[in-house]
Image (tube, helix red, strand yellow):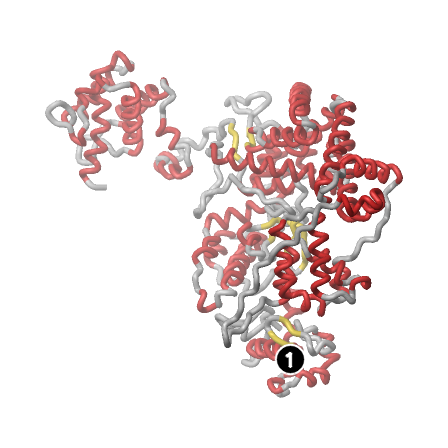
Amino acid sequence: MTSNRLTRLFTLFVAAATFVNARADELGGPGDVATILAQRCADCHGADLAEGDVRLDAIAALGLDARLDLLNRVQEQLFLQRMPPEDEEQPTAAERVSLESWVSQELHKYNAAKFEKKLQKPEYGNYVDHDNLFSGEFKELPGFTYDRRWLISEYIFDAKFQRMLQGNARAKRRGATVSVLGSHRFQQLSLTNPFLLPNRSGVRYYADTDLTGGHLSSMLTNAQKSSEYITDYLVKRKAGYLPAIKEIMALEDAHHATLAARREFLEKFIAKLCEDEFGAEHQAMLPRFVPVELNPVKELAEGETYKKLPRPVAMNTLVKLEGAETFYQLAGSPEHENKSDEEIQRLCERIWFYNGDHERVIQGRLAILREYIADFREHIDVKTLSRYPTPAFKPLTDDEMQAIKAALLKHRKAGDFYDDVIEKCLAEWESEFEQVRIDAGPPADDLLRALVDQLSLLILERSPDATEAEEYVVLAKSYVNKLGNLKAIQKLIQTLMLSSEFVYRQEFGSGEPDEYGRRMLAPRDASYAIAYALTDQSPDAELVEAARSGRLNTRDDYRREATRILKKRDVHFLIDPILEDKNFQENTTDTAIRKLRFFREFFGYPKAITIFKDEKRFGGDRLENATARLLSETDRIVEHILESEENVFEKLLSTEEFFVYHDGDNDRMQAASDRIKRIYAHFKDLDWQSFKKEDLLDHRDFLKEVKMRSVDPDKLEARNRQGTTIQLFKKSMTTITARLDKGQREAAPFDLYRGYGNDFMSG
């Protein structure tokens, strides 16, 4: 630190001295503090000399905010012992204690001790006085923590939603596919994790983070998405999932199902229904047909050729314009097989027009058919027709057919497009069903209580007490009255997800205090503290039962449960969400995940995945997989050393062992190596480089047995993006030979490749 900076910092200290002399009565500065400050600091900060541009003789004119800001700065310099400067006479230990105590008291009068709040942050941990820390003077003092709440971490967030939404993630563990905990992927749902931890090495998760507007903004969106996913997807597909919702929504769901069935029926058969019901009047009631006009095809200049898109691209465009179904149903029908291309186009246009499709959409479809219809018809096959079958007319029940026919007769007017008729029918039915639900009344209180209890168990993992339950029932009733059943249920789900209990984990003491005034954690809080100390998951069944049955009240109880969890090997955890996003499968551990994560954060090796830039060596298409594997293999060696439970740090710091393209299962790796050695031994003395595809038939039985990837002697004409069967065989043999032709004893079972290419492939 420079002398100029020390001088500036020292001026803050002197400011406090003058401040005490000037305003001692107002802030209660004791005489000894005023004397100390006057003796140590006043010479440099007065009317004649104001080092650091601080004049302390005018401190009395400062407002309260300015004075408190000054005291905070003084407190920081006192704590860091940056003033007085080293070359000045220092206060005695007693004087320093007196000053620090007074400044702290004054700041606490106004709840303005900003620097003391800073000291609670992890980055200030190293400022603890090391002489005091290691002196042994305080070793007999009882350890404790304050009652506290932790904001959940990004990993706990993922685990909570995976549990609530019944996510079933799968990954690889030593060659086997296993279910894993900790995934943030859900079918048909994307959530934003608002609790991301700092991207730095070292421990990143502490109980000092507060909930902010940024957290709430993301949580609002997450809660809305999740509530809709629960009501619209999970409840309808998962038996026994929140049965109260299914019961509350039973009538409305039945109405929606009926409306959906009627809509589907009308959209398929409205032309036939109208013909049947209106008979001779039907044609006259159709809107006047107005054909669309297409822009003329541009004439080509002499020597210019017309370049068309590939047929599959054109067909995909027709599919996106929702015109493929009508075209194939007409073009593939025996009734129309002798019609010309122009006649098929005109039939399609009339159907689309009478349906009420937009003119521009019809133009787009016809523009494609004008250029490709002959090509499309030439390539019609059974598979294509099976994708677009012509629906067979099958009437609904008598009651349903009566309702449909009555609505058609009531709502169809001359000149109506079919889509307009359908919408008028549906509007009437929706109104009728809504009145039926109104007449049925709101859900009964008992059903709402069941809903509250089920949602509380799902989201907060506990049943509400009697007072909470009644409050939530009243709230649910108000939501139903204002929003209707479905929106009310979604709103109640959102309310619980946005509660502080959902985003915080708490550690509060309960029961009788000991001789030092300390209280053990409440059993439920203790169960979560243990679970979250070792995993990202909520307490498992054994831990929940221990808390419930009174077996989680002592240190021995804590030790028993922590030891049990550490020894468990029947649960698999996802290690790294980044690797999951890269679709890297070997990303699991059966070790308590926070045990492994401690060493990941301590050594900081996951950062390799963001700084590894050796694209030329690995090839741009392979670098991502190489860095993911490098990180995964580092996890493997750390996990391996942790399992030994002996000299862990020494081994981690000094080991020269490493897993190289190894998933941790020696038997599986040996079997894979033996298979590659068999292939090498079978072909090494043959001129396989000159093989023709027919030559593979001489080795058919062997190839069927060893199963070289993408090499099937029964499918010699097969190919993929990397080449034909014989090309793939030669590429595979190239990499196998490279692994064994220098006298190697084992063959590494992994892909071998060159940068920027696929010259080599795995065996």
Front residue of this view, candidates 398 and 632: 398
Q: Quadrant of the N terminus?
A: top left
Q: Nearer the viewer, residue 188 or 528?
A: 188
Image quadrant holding the C terminus, namely: bottom right
Q: Position of residue 725 (x, y in %)?
A: 65, 77
Considering only vertical position in the picture, is 692 above or below 278? Answer: below
- At x 76% / y 59%, what residue is drawn? 330
Q: Which residue is mark 1?
A: 726
In the image as oriented, which residue stretches furthest toward the right?
398
Res. 226 image quadrant: top right
Residue 462 visible in the shown view: no
Q: Quadrant of residue 315?
A: bottom right
Q: Amino acid at mark 1?
A: Ile
Instruction: Give the mark count.
Output: 1
Q: Going 74% across and 21% down the picture, which residue do you hit?
A: 445
Crowding near pointer 1: few (<14 within 10 Å), some, many (20+)? Answer: many
Residue, far top? 25
594 to the left or right of 549: left
Q: Is residue 19 left or right of residue 264?
A: left
Q: Is residue 191 visible?
A: yes
Give x and y (percent) for residue 593: 58, 47
Secondary structure of the residue carrying numbered label 1? helix
Residue under the point 30% across and 34% down: 80
Residue 307 at what x, y percent from top left? 55, 70
State the residue lying farthest toward the left: 48
> Which corner quadrant of the image does residue 10 belong to?
top left
